[in-house]
Image (cartoon, grey):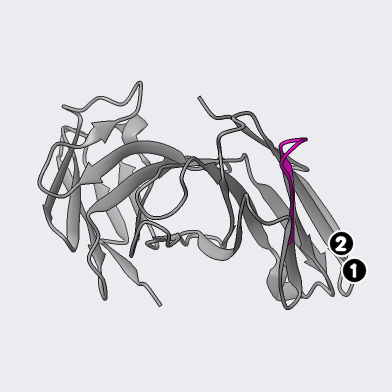
Amino acid sequence: GAVVSQHPSRVICKSGTSVKIECRSLDFQATTMFWYRQFPKQSLMLMATSNEGSKATYEQGVEKDKFLINHASLTLSTLTVTSAHPEDSSFYICSAGTGNNQPQHFGDGTRLSIL
Amino acid sequence: GENVEQHPSTLSVQEGDSAVIKCTYSDSASNYFPWYKQELGKGPQLIIDIRSNVGEKKDQRIAVTLNKTAKHFSLHITETQPEDSAVYFCAASLGGGATNKLIFGTGTLLAVQP
């Protein structure tokens, strides 16, 4: 089955640090990947759609200069949280699918804690 | 835009009993409805999905029903086991598949008591 891998699984860093999270499709190519944020005991909120070879599409209210997305290849998308602050602490999850009529599969998420 | 409501927020059942989780959606154009199971500290895992051209789909102990007229769909788990305990999310999508964004419900915490 389709496998989506995220790295790192856990990050703890100081306020003001920029953090990069990687999302890889291990056994398939993905022209589109999605980035979600999930606060404790809440649902997944879509942040942006990552498109290979073009700019990401951000959801309303998500700062594109704060959350930089780069979809460098058909198997890798990265999310960089720039100048992270405690309020950016959350669980960040990516998803991808193998084709237009195939379901999305999720990575195991990255727990980001900003001190 | 699409809005998905999910009920109940918590559900406790005895092992062996059935569990039902219900979702409603607002956009009649939505045509793909997956269900995900999320265990603590992990990403969501797809357990079953249904498209709008089908009214019901079953996979062993799990089934999903869709009522397009009423714009609601439900997850049914029979013969529940302790390992079914997790948070379950429904979602809706226009177009479905890997390139269309999913709108998630608020989640249901299912606890199966042994």
Mark 2 = which residue?
A: B13
The front one of B83 and A17 is: B83
Can you say whether A32 is above or below A84 in the image?
Answer: below
Q: Quadrant of the C terminus of chain A?
A: top left
Q: Do the residues under discs 1 and 2 have CB atoms within 8 angstroms? A: yes
Which percent across, then down, holds residue A114? 29, 40
Q: Is residue A36 left or right of residue A55?
A: right
Q: Quadrant of the N terminus of chain A?
A: bottom left
Can you say whether B24 is above or below B83 in the image?
Answer: above
Dot 1 amino acid type: Asp
Q: Is B19 covered by the magenta stretch?
A: no
As drawn, the label of residue B17 is 1
- The chain containing the residue under callout 1 comes to B
Dot 2 amino acid type: Val
Which percent across, then down, holds residue A25? 26, 66
Secondary element at image label 2: strand
Q: Residue at x 90, y 68 (%)?
A: B17
Mark 2 surroundings: few (<14), some (14-19) or many (≥20) residues within 10 A: some
Q: Is residue B95 visible?
A: yes
Q: Is residue A115 visible?
A: no
* Quarter of the rendering containing residue A47: top left
